[in-house]
Amino acid sequence: MGTVPQVKPLRRSFIRFPTQVEFGAGTLKRLGEFTADYGKKAFCLFDPFFKGSEAAQTAMDALHAVGIETYECYNVHPNPRAGDIDDVTAECKEQNCDFVVSMGGGGTVDIGKAVAFLVTNGRGAWDYTTKENQFYYSIEEKPLPFVAIPTTAGTGSEATIYSVVNNPDIQRKCTIRSFELYPKLAIIDPELMLDIPPLLTALTGIDTFAHAFESYTNKNATLFSKMVAMESMRLFAENIIPCVEDGKNLEARANMAFSSFLGGLCIAHSPTTIPHIIGQCLSGWVDAPHGGSLAVCLAQVIRWTLPAGQKEFAEIARVMDPKLSAVSDEEAAKALPEIVDALFVRIMGNQRVTMKTYGMDETRADEFATFIFNNYQGDMSNYLRVPTPDELKQIIQECL
Amino acid sequence: MGTVPQVKPLRRSFIRFPTQVEFGAGTLKRLGEFTADYGKKAFCLFDPFFKGSEAAQTAMDALHAVGIETYECYNVHPNPRAGDIDDVTAECKEQNCDFVVSMGGGGTVDIGKAVAFLVTNGRGAWDYTTKENQFYYSIEEKPLPFVAIPTTAGTGSEATIYSVVNNPDIQRKCTIRSFELYPKLAIIDPELMLDIPPLLTALTGIDTFAHAFESYTNKNATLFSKMVAMESMRLFAENIIPCVEDGKNLEARANMAFSSFLGGLCIAHSPTTIPHIIGQCLSGWVDAPHGGSLAVCLAQVIRWTLPAGQKEFAEIARVMDPKLSAVSDEEAAKALPEIVDALFVRIMGNQRVTMKTYGMDETRADEFATFIFNNYQGDMSNYLRVPTPDELKQIIQECL
């Protein structure tokens, strides 16, 4: 560890998305067809939920059919720490696998992404996480081929350059960011999503909406990232209620799976801003699920932002409620926080979640706001309106 | 030539687009930054129009600045035959270049794409063109890195897997199709498009609209290709008149450049159908520019298709004229051919072009329709409505 880390700053292209994407009901069965030349042995990192499942068998049968040997690993922590990821990496190395296949939620896909490059790059996961004003290591060696098979519609991790690493010791989620983290192949099969319970469907769906909303309202959004983000929000608005209310609705699940993918694709090009910063910090401080941590602050951030962002908010509001095409930008924009609030309440089982729901209370709110401001000032500067420390305190108070 | 060609059928992915895209006014200046590790010597295939131009100098200065040697070639035929492409390939080989940079219209980009793979694959261009029911050769060796710099907004060739090869001896345009034809890098700089004259702006713009329209109405269109096609049509409808009427409008040019790129991206995933078949055959029979050959048949094909495709046509009509949001699908769909007709007349200098404008006459019309049917029956089957031989004759009559 004596050498000084070489950090290359991330320079985003207008479009850079080398991942091959295969989409549609039944696509999992064709896994072998797409990976036949990836190597002889696959490290199958599956969510523990899939142990002994038909889906796991389908994936492995497809690999065996083209002569690929498989090693199953279910050692997936829902909010993995660097050490958890390093353990899985050691297992993958020991098994001499040629490529990595992750099937599961965003956490599982994130771990697989990290394992695929850690196997060839040598250091531990924590060394590669981005830290403001601190050195960290770049990925120098080509990762193993990585296949992402998302089984929730939320993180869009199959389309991003990010892998999240938890560090409860410093109350933070940190991120590894690199174009080397794009999967080589993503298999998006909505049949894998038919059994997701309503609450998880809602929580992951809110994450998708947050990705698209934050990417769209990022100051650095482009013609491409905005197209992708807008279509993601349109599909979310049209399909999240059907998915929550009738999980077996294959068409709605397919549309939400694509919405989630687009949410990932847009943040890979124009990243998240304030709601994700607040949400990730909240999950570091209290035990809030990722989607819940966003649900408690999205409408509040939008409300505080007005009248800045009126044009963008009006565009989003009209996609979520086409009837607003007839009204002025001002009126449409003002409607947005109410639309978001009402939709979230409905899909969360007619319950309003707040920061208090997850254990944050008034006495720590100001300290929490200061913590956010001190650690993420830089990332917040990409949002349409940049809060002062006092304004951030006020936003957090509104979220309680 | 004794061996039997190995043809791998093209299996399209839901998304497969490895090209790095850099977009925006002034991006050409940064060419060297993106290509610094592509090799030591660049084969600069520029449209003859750029000989001695500031744009050519900017491109070469950018390469020289990072130590890359350049060889200039202006040997570009507007409708290249296989032999023309083979000549340029020989020149590139002789100069021992490491990568190819094409700057110009769709034809120039197409030639550069072909040269980049012909240099490493050995045979002549004609051997790789797709022929129905006939053998042709696959691209087996990795092409040289290829950089596309489009200077018109039309073909979207910077985002496609196609290269067109003309063969007037058999009255046909043929196509090389392969994922190996995707550029490694596309530089889309709308500043290069400010001097395109109104008629060329209109003709190339019509090509863009045709790509997006045909991709959207292809039976195999997907959630992804439809998103891309629809945004392409929206941007075309909003920006083509400003581009024709005030060529120096940088924002409109940028939007049309992106529309054209999206037109290419969608046909790489869900290809063109009947209008392009008719148009390409027309250009083989008479001396019609590509955009003109599409302008003479698009509205006629739409009119003949109704009431099939009513849903798709209504969606397109509403993007081109948002006022149609208030009317029924039937009414909106019926308005589409008139919208297209009126827009084309306006941008073509208030002139209606027909097949007669380009030299096709009644006496050859039926023979022409039969020729199309016999040669392209397979490709037509992807369209919303598949014509019989007699129906095709009727469509051609309407286009005269």
Image: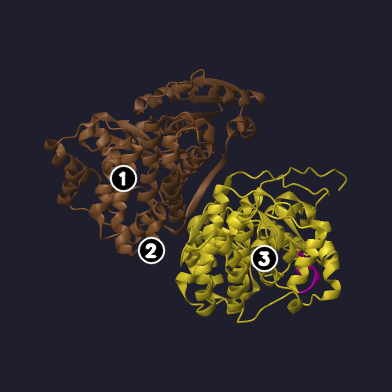
Chain colours: A brown, B yellow
Mark 2 crowd level (few <14, some 14–19, many ≥20, 10 Å Cα) = few
Q: Position of residue A253 (x, y in %)?
A: 49, 38
Placement of the C terminus of chain B among the 4 image quadrants: bottom right
**Which residue type carries mark 2?**
Ala
Dividing the picture into quadrants, the one containing residue B196 is bottom right
Q: Chain of mark 3?
A: B
How far apart are the two marked residues, 3 and 1, measured between alpha carbons? 43 Å
- The x, y position of residue B54, in whole percent, is 53, 74
Classify residue B106 as left or right of residue A215: right
Assign the magenta stretch its main secondary structure: helix
**Local SS, label 3:** helix
What residue is drawn where x is 58% and y is 78%?
B346
The local crowd at label 1, few if under 14, some if 14 to 19, many if 20 or more residues have their Cα within 10 Å, is some
Q: Are marks 2 and 3 on the same chain?
A: no
Left or right, A124 with reference to B176: left
To the question of a shared chain for discs 1 and 2, the answer is yes
Read off the residue under disc 1.
A342
The chain to which mark 2 is attached is A
Could you tell me which residue is drawn at 73 percent across and 52 percent down?
A: B381
Q: Is residue B36 above or below residue B27?
A: above
* Discs 3, 1 touching: Cβ within 8 Å: no
The residue lying at 75 percent from left, 46 percent from top is B138
- SS at circle 1: helix
Choose between B310 and B34: the one closer to the eye.
B310
Of callouts 1 and 2, the N-terminal one: 2
Say whether residue A156 is visible.
no
Magenta segment boundaries in residue numbering: B281-287
Residue to which mark 2 is pinned: A326
Q: Circle 3 is placed at which residue position?
A: B303
